[in-house]
Amino acid sequence: MRLLSRGDLVTLAFTGLLVGAAAVVGVSVGVQAATPPLYALWHPHVGPGTVPALVVGVAVVLGGTRVAAALSWRRLLAAAYATALAWTLGLALVDGWRDGVATRLTVDAEYLAALPNAGGIPAMIRTYASRILDFQPDSWNTQAAGHPPGALLVFAVLDRIGLSGGAAAGLVCVAVGCLAAVAVPSALRSLGDEPAARAAVPFVVLFPGAVWVGVSGDGLFLGVTAVAVALLAAGVRRSWLAVLAGVLFGFACFLSYGLVLMVFPALAVAIAARRWTPLAWATLGALPVVGAFALAGFWWFDGYAAVRVRYYQGIAAQRPYWYWVWADLAALAVSAGPAGFAAARRAVVVRAGPAGLLCLGAMAAIVVADLSGLSKAEVERIWLPFAIWLPAAAVLLPPRSRPFWLALQAVVALLVNHLFHTVW
């Protein structure tokens, strides 16, 4: 019996060719990315996280599927979260404590660099949209300008409660981002497919996108949206959880404009559950969040209109659409991993069960984001909230082949973190 089917072999070959073509074409024509298709600097190195990351990777590859099948559910979730933390921090610490964690969010273009000029929180939100456009004395820096005020608000609150500085902010991003290792399988189980949930665990733990979860604000966004989907799935039976999911979905829209596209995974939950009432309850939960920001002085559509202008005031104007509309998918292949693309192919062909539907929902979000032209480069981190749902459909992969796919996932993450310095 062959380890991989012909379709899986073709998918694997296509993924490799896609990444290779994006690299060759990107270097040849110049596309405003340090090492296309990744926004990263070539920097072969090892660090204090090398051995821990290798140990975690090998352990999950060799025993992950067996442990996921054997442990009680609560112990499995606890083990998944702890292992995801170890994997993510191990990868981050390949760059050392300072460069890998403590200063990632403090450089000039990052959120923490914008805090000293943000003013008080009420004034920050009230004046936020007026400061998005560039070439003004009080313009926001790159990350603050490119996102709604929710992202900067999180770091401002952390600062106010004593968790100031890059180290605390970085660790919070990792801690929240790793909640995806619990939230994703929980969503699948709530939708009635525990085998899919258990199959997903080692794949969401050994997620190659963990390279960017540790440390970027998008890791935080991943955790928030994954928990929102899990709560929505649980809200099929408990309406108050769907309301809480709506609160998180609503807040996610104020973390990143692109997270409105989480509507597609939310629809996938409703389709899998064959119930639409959780979406209604979630909408009720989201509306007060939108209203609160509006009352505080920030209207989402004003910010979105301004950020479209700001987007083309910067480096995006020099990034060719014809290249990134397909090279973005190569960057996605790195963060979702080869297993993510293999599972996605099977989801298209089979369209079976909650895992397949959630994978399709994430794919729909990715296609819309890609075609919009507002996601040119850096999607290896920007699309983390969508990318996680591709390898989460691991139940669609034949059980015999799963350790092989897990090994590929680990190799991709380890190579990226040891060969490149991921800028964000």
Image (cartoon, rainbow, N blue to C red):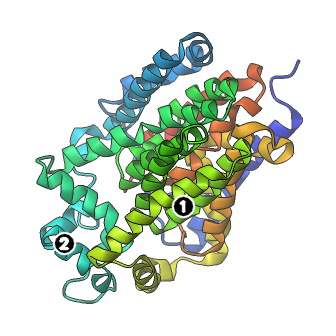
Residue 377 visible, this angle: yes
Q: Secondary structure at mark 1?
A: loop
Q: Is residue 220 above or below residue 108?
A: above
x%, y% of residue 396?
A: 76, 33
Q: Is residue 358 above or below residue 298?
A: above
* Disc marking residue 62: none
x%, y% of residue 167?
A: 20, 44
x%, y% of residue 333?
A: 63, 49
Residue, x 60% and y 67% (percent of image)?
A: 369
x%, y% of residue 171?
A: 27, 41
Q: Secondary structure at mark 2?
A: helix
Residue, x 59% and y 37% (percent of image)?
A: 237
Look at mark 1 in the image and give the residue it sits on. 36
Q: Is residue 20 above or below residue 177?
A: below
Q: Residue furthest bottom?
A: 136
Residue, x 61% and y 74% (percent of image)?
A: 372
Residue, x 34% and y 36% (percent of image)?
A: 94
Left/right placement of residue 280 relative to residue 165 reads right
Look at mark 2 in the image and give the residue it sits on. 122
Query: Are there few (<14), some (14-19), or many (20+) residues within 10 Å of tag 1?
Result: many
Q: Quadrant of the N terminus?
A: top right
> Which is nearer the eye, 100 or 134?
134
Looking at marks 1 and 2 on the same chain, the residue that comes earlier in the sequence is marked by 1
Q: Quadrant of the C terminus?
A: bottom left
Q: Residue furthest top?
A: 70
Query: Are there few (<14), some (14-19), or many (20+) residues within 10 Å of tag 2?
Result: few
The disc labelled 1 sits on which kind of residue?
A: Pro
Q: Nearer the viewer, mark 1 or mark 2?
A: 2
Residue 254 visible, this angle: no
